[in-house]
Image (cartoon, coloured by chain):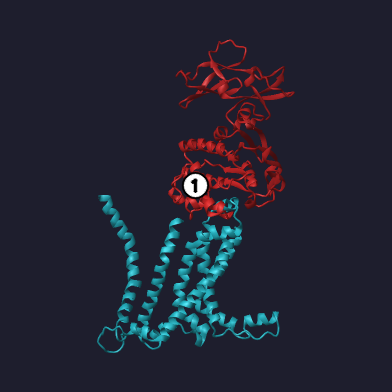
Amino acid sequence: MRIETRRRWAIAWLTGPAYLWLAVTIFLPLSAMLYFSFQKKGPFGKHASEFSLKHYEAFFTKGYLQDLMWRSLEMGFHVTGLCILIGFPAAYWLARRIRGRWREALFLLIVLPFWSNALVRVFSWTIVLRPDGVLDRAVQSVIPGLPAIDLTDSYPAIIIGLVHSYLPYMILTCFLSLQAIDESLLEAARSLGARSWTILVRIILPLAVPGLAAGSILIFVPVIGSFFEPRLLGGPKGTVIGTVIEEQFTVVSNWPLGGALSFILLAIVLLILAVAAPVLKNHMRTT
Amino acid sequence: MSAVDVRNVSKHYGAVTALDRVSLAFPNGSFFALLGPSGSGKTTLLRALAGFVEPDEGMIFIDDQDVAHIPSFRRNIGMVFQNYALFPHMSVFDNVAFGLTVRRLPRAEVRQRVTKILELVRLDGLDRRKPRELSGGQQQRVALARALVTEPRVLLLDEPLGALDKKLRQDMQGELKRIQRTVGITTVFVTHDQEEALTLSDHIAIIDEGRLIQVGEPGDVYDRPHTRFAANFLGDANFLSGSVRDSGIMVDRLGYIATTSPLPAGEATIAVRPERIRLMAPDTATQDNRIEGRVAERVFSGASLTYTVDTDAGPLRVLRQNADGDVIDIGDRVALVWLADHSVVVED
């Protein structure tokens, strides 16, 4: 009994600071934002606090907000999908084909973008993608006379920038689950008559699902809320729900609408996770 | 006819020679043990049969087809891995059915064959479990069922019982033998456990440093080891060296030791198994080989006792069944007596 109580105290002491920190940095600001989202007006000027649902209603009545939300989700799917298409093979190659020093060196290259400022990275892409930019010149030098490539202020530019920023997450999470696959499993499959393609589809992919899922969540969630990549790379075409939310706080000072949209975004993310959870749980249990 | 025939197979890893011109014929339906210490090349040989290692030289015939350079998935082999290598995301049924579904057999046939093989390994009723919900012994049976269900031409076992505790290992040895006999499949298994090799197999190949040392039936290899290494690795042995005279050797300070094995000219080494030596009173007269010594050490292991006896040619080990509960005291003088038949001439 004494040991039991002492253990409880130890747990409280050891975990307490972390929970306190989470409460101060996440729970408090989030509750404040939730409070504002149900206010008629923001915390500026002198007016009494007044409960209102109008900012939530705004989302359902104003079609363009729904369009922008849809646009953001679409962007999230596109970026996540491309990250899987590029990241999974890269992770496979790193985890199963490359050994020793080379692997460390390649890992460094993958993590390198994390060391530079995100804004600088995005601006670099504008230099690459503009007409007469790096990409244009490179293509022209190979095939002269081709029409100029101009990706400035375009949807593909946003996607390229976002994929570049978030790809490392997919590579790292997939790498971890691919590396955990015992080589003897693949040999067993081969001895039973399976060719490479069958082994990939029936053994490797199912066992890599946890990595793919973790990577997808780590990418999808921030991408649908992103705002400076769409704005800098998409220009006038780069309006998404993220940029609208950001403007509510920085430009038009409509905190309640910004808050309401943020919580709708959060609700959609939670909904998607809830739908995906049973499938993932099933897979996690097996590995 | 040999089901599997290995001819002059060599494999090098950089400067290391894993297999050095190994030739070995595995008779049809045999239960063949590859025995050797770790790093001897026995696993490399098994993996070459499986197709995971491509030999640098030589040929590997399975049913008269040279498969040395044919990929694993086209060899029609069954393999049980040391860690079982069960697919963790599949049920027992799906694991066993894998080889059949890969071959695109109709579902009804898959179901029927999986059910039948699970009965053979006595796992019926567990087909919906996941591998991690099974005990070590049950996982082993799933691995065996999965390897056998495709009716392969040869079954390869890589230290199949290494991960099990002693009691379970003995049970599984019996099971393995029963299943192998029922199916009648040529089986090659790798082990470093000499007892396992003797119990399970009907043929043993002793391998060391990539070379084949000796092949034969367990009794022959045990009774007539060709080399000092074979005598020492399969069982325990005492060695006596001396110059050849008539049908025996003269050992320094010890005298004449007779043997019935053919002797080389000059010097020779004789191996004697500890259990072939009888301990007698020091004044016993006998026609057999006889040397005297003093008991220096006694190790009690239940059913038997091992004595170390100091003789003029050094310490010799003697194994004695604990049949009558008689124990010889340390320091007692004894005579060590054995038949000339049990003096086996070995190469150094």
User: In percent of the image, x 59 and y 64: which residue is there?
Assistant: A105
B259 above or below A254? above
Q: Which of B29 and B54 is in front in this view?
A: B29
User: In percent of the image, x 26 and y 85: which residue is there?
Assistant: A50
Q: What type is the residue that disc 1 sits on? A: Thr
> Which chain is mark 1 on?
B
What residue did someone put label 1 on? Answer: B115
Q: In which quarter of the image is residue B269?
A: top right
The answer to whether residue B228 is left or right of residue B332 is right
- The image position of residue A67, as x and y in percent, is 44, 83
Q: How many labels does the image show?
A: 1
Could you say which chain is coloured red in the image? Answer: B
B207 above or below A19? above
- The image position of residue A132, as x and y in percent, is 63, 85
Q: Nearer the viewer, residue A85 or A230?
A: A85
Asked whether residue B79 is in view, the answer is yes
Could you say which chain is coloured cyan in the image? Answer: A
- The image position of residue B318, as x and y in percent, is 54, 23
The answer to whether residue B96 is left or right of residue B74 is left
- The image position of residue A41, as x and y in percent, is 30, 87
User: In percent of the image, x 43 and y 49: which residue is there?
Assistant: B133
Q: Circle 1: is it few (<14), some (14-19), or many (20+) Cα within 10 Å?
A: some
Q: Nearer the viewer, residue A122 or A199?
A: A199
Q: What element carries label 1?
A: helix
The answer to whether residue A240 is left or right of residue B291 is left
Asked whether residue A226 is in view, the answer is no
